[in-house]
Image: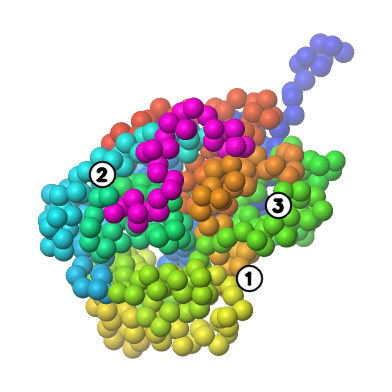
Amino acid sequence: MKEYLRGAKKEPRNAVIVGAGPGGLAAAMLLAKSGVKVTVVEKRGVVGGRTSTIEQDGFKFDVGPTFFLYPRVLKEIFSAAGYDLASEVPMTRLDPQYRLVFGAGGELLATPNVERMEKAIAAISPEDAQQFHKFIKHNRNKLEKFLPFLQSPFESWRDLAKIDMLKLVPLLSPWKSLDGDLQTHFKDERIRLGFSFQSKYLGMSPFRCPSLFSILSFLEYEHGVFHPTGGCGAVTKAMARICREMGVEILLNEPVERVLIEDGKAIGVKTANHSLPANAVVVNADFAGAMKKMVPNRLRNRWTDERLAKKKYSCSTFMMYLGIDGRYDDVSHHTIYLEKNYKQNLRDIEELHKLSEEPSFYVQNASVTDKTLAPDGKSTLYVLLPVTHESDKVDWAKETPRYRELALDQMEKIGITDVRRRIRTERIVTPTGWASDFDLYKGATFSMAHSLDQMLHLRPHNRFEDVDQMYLVGGGTHPGSGLPVIFESARITSKLLLEDLKMEPQWHVTDTVGDAIARDALVGVAS
């Protein structure tokens, strides 16, 4: 009998991942590579979550993220699984990266070419042009020093109090806002906005966002802004295909009703069609929305409904996906229009929770780079207006038609004219739609705000503190929002889960921050 037992095959450890968004798929790849039997359950009929693709009348649109930044993290995850990102997902490095148009006057074609960028800045503010190189050098140092902490879990204040972390305090300047930090480099407010609008990737104002996040604009200039052929949704499609090739089961149209919890431990999930037992449950869904739906309030000691209601949440977005007859070849791939009353725009969103009458906005005109997104002779426009998350001050059933017209009028300010006549297909998503279709709490598209009191150990932990054997990935947990950071959360979470299962991760990080892989190793890099 003993010999039989010694020769018996050990049952594989299994995990259920709730949500086939980018964080969930990345975790599935890493766990499957390490020998875990993985099942991913997804409520929608397509993979990708907010990083999925809308296909309508022959046009393709990214649902959410359109900027693909810092591919190093995902390259390492693909490599760990035995795949090459450049081969699986062709990408084009954009140059110019985007066009910034200032309502207060002037515009800036942002380029990673230092000499050309200095000239572009000098056209607006000659004094500030001399500071660009200093800004890059300062933030290169900041990222290199802080990166090990972005790659590590923060499970208590003790992680914050480590000597190496305390040494970083002068460099990180947590007492400064992002705009305050940029004032040490740039005098002209327009230039500062050009290096701080990226705080909107976190759904925050640069006047409130912590100074740490100056690294976001640095990443664009140091490592590039990329467009995956087919859009960012092509990335998650490739990840899902690789997951299946690795033996991961992905169940679509399978909304989770609740996490199965016994004696304080997650033991699986219950869907409309299945009860799926598991040694570990990973939740890759909007944190607040998922907790309220999937885990009874009485089983959450720290993250109760009452506490969730008191947290600060990011802005939302008013989205228009437009299929257009013809093209706008003189409009950049990415254009950001910053109104002259930008500060009031932010106040309307974060404090007053009302709609601005002259809103700032962003337009992606990706067909100038990627012909696969639209039928011949046609193109796509992705239009985003930052707005307040759900509030009783805004009735979207009433406001949607009016705000649509306002958005179309605003687009004329960046050269998109006569657009109404040329629309061949259209879809609109409001904060109410984000809440209903994607289960986003308050329709907040970037989850909890990234204020100092909601970061690091004060954010929901990757190893969920209220339920054993339950783990989190995505923008709602540490390190936070944005695709590179979400992929990093998947790596952190996967390591913790494997540690608890007493299994060794079957991957390792070999690349350094200074590597040129993000610049040169991807196919289709634009010259």
Percent x, y for residue 46? 57, 60
Quarter of the image where one finds residue 442: bottom right
Q: Which residues are magenta?
A: 154-183
Which amino acid does the dot numbered 2 rest on?
Ile
- Please tell me the numbered disc located at residue 303: 3
Residue 421 shows up from this direction = yes
Q: Quadrant of the N terminus?
A: top right
Secondary structure under the numbered disc 1 in the rendered image: helix
Residue 436, disc: 1
Residue 511, quarter of the rendered image: top left
Residue flagged by tag 1: what amino acid is it? Ser
Which is more N-terminal, label 3 or label 2? 2
Task: Give the left or right position of residue 112, taking residue 479 as reference.
Answer: left
- N-terminal of the pair, mark 3 or mark 1, is 3
Q: Is residue 67 visible?
A: no
Which callout, 3 or 1, points to the residue nearer the camera? 3
Q: Nearer the viewer, mark 2 or mark 1?
A: 2
Which picture quadrant has residue 406? bottom left
> Image point 72% across, 60% down: which residue?
306
Q: Which residue is mark 2?
A: 136
Question: Farthest residue toward the right?
Answer: 1
Q: Nearer the viewer, residue 145 or 174?
A: 174
Identify the residue at the far front of this view: 175
Q: Main secondary structure of the magenta part?
A: helix
Pointer 3 and pointer 1: residues touching (CB < 8 Å)? Answer: no
Tell me where residue 128 appears, x and y as whole percent.
Answer: 18, 55
In reply to whether residue 357 is colored magenta, the answer given is no
Horizontally, residue 235 falls left or right of residue 129, namely: right
